[in-house]
Image: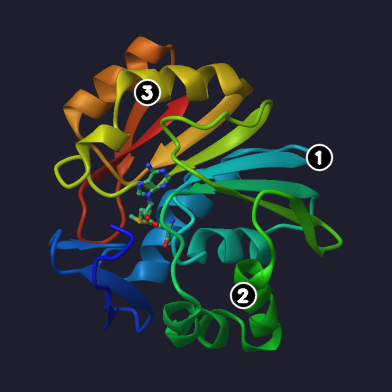
């Protein structure tokens, strides 16, 4: 995946996504990347928790869109961990329109999310600390006491090894009671693996263009 070609594309809400021709897979929904990210991770996840501080874990940092939206959306202290095996090149990152489109006043924060070092905690704002882990989510140690998981891997039919019983078991044990995991995926086999791991499962309406998505609660 590291060396696979990535094409910049516009989605229906005017925000960019990346397309990998060799996998025939997009990083986000072509119906709207920002719209999807807000729906699946911010509204169905972040907004469902009322805590004084939060630890978030994202599987697949990619373009940094979910991290940026989370940073802009919250004023409680957030420790944001994210695992990425194939970091994007600076050239691709600089071509993404998220900073300018979502919050021109704070677009430098979007850049900062990408330019800060990996594998150490970095204070991005007073209330947002970023910890980017360079590695494979199936192998690396997971952070503990996680309140919210954004499971944003490529689709199960494109990268099946990401969606396995063991990762959902490990995530479950890394989470706090009442913690939430959200994903855009609605597949029955994924729902069953999460249930087997111990989560209470809900199928909820998906973002435009997708009937359903999954939310798992510990
Ligand atoms: C659907 S994309 C979403 C990325 C990101 N959340 C975004 O909004 O741009 C999936 C991401 O998972 C990453 N990925 C693939 N295999 C991985 C692995 N084994 N461990 C961690 N991340 C992985 C990909 O490189 C890609 O960035």
Give the mark nearer the N terminus: 2 vs 1. Answer: 1
Most foreground residue, 90 or 126: 90
Reading the image, the residue beneath label 3 is 201
Give the residue at mark 1.
52
Q: Does 115 appear above or below 37?
A: below
**Real-space Cα distance between discs 2 and 3?**
33 Å
- Which type of secondary structure does the marked residue at label 3 adopt? strand
Instruction: Return the disc, 3 or 1, that comes first in the chain's sequence.
Output: 1
Who's the residue at 24% across and 38% down the image?
186
Residue 176 - label: none
Label 1 neighbour load within 10 Å: few <14, some 14-19, many 20+: few
Indicate the colouring scheme: rainbow
On the image, numbered disc 2 is attached to which residue? 110
Judge whether 24 appears above or below 10 on screen.
Answer: above
Judging from the image, what secondary structure is the residue with disc 2 in?
A: helix
Which structural element holds mark 1? loop
Residue 179 percent location from the top left of the image: 59, 27
Q: Is mark 1 within 8 Å of ligand 1?
A: no
Query: Of residues 147 and 132, which is closer to you in this image?
Result: 132
Give the x, y percent position of residue 66. 51, 59
Q: Quadrant of residue 208?
A: bottom left
Q: Which one is closest to the eye, mark 2 or mark 1?
A: 2
Q: Quadrant of residue 31?
A: bottom left
Specify whether tag 3 is near ligand 1 (CB below 8 Å): no
**Residue at the image position 29 percent from the left and 19 percent from the top:** 193
Task: Answer with mark 2 or mark 3, whichever residue precedes in sequence.
Answer: 2
Which residue is located at x 30 percent, y 72 percent? 18
């Amino acid at each position: 995946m590291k060396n696979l070609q990535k094409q910049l594309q516009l989605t229906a809400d005017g925000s960019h996504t990346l397309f990998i021709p060799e996998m025939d897979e997009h990083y986000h929904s072509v119906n709207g990347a920002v719209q999807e990210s807000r729906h699946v991770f911010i509204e169905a996840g972040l907004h469902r928790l009322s805590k004084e501080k939060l630890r978030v874990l994202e599987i697949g940092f990619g373009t940094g869109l979910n991290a940026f939206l989370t940073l802009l959306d919250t004023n409680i202290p957030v420790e944001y961990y994210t695992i990425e095996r194939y970091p994007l090149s600076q050239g691709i990152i600089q071509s993404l329109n998220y900073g300018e489109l979502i919050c021109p006043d704070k677009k430098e924060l979007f850049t900062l999310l990408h330019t800060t070092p990996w594998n150490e905690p970095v204070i991005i704002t007073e209330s947002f600390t970023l910890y980017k882990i360079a590695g494979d989510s199936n192998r690396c140690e997971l952070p503990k006491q996680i309140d919210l998981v954004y499971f944003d891997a490529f689709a199960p039919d494109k990268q099946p090894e990401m969606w396995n019983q063991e990762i959902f078991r490990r995530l479950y044990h890394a989470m706090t009671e009442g913690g939430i995991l959200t994903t855009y995926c609605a597949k029955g086999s994924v729902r069953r693996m999460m249930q087997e791991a111990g989560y209470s499962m809900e199928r909820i309406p998906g973002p435009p263009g997708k009937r359903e998505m999954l939310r798992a609660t510990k």
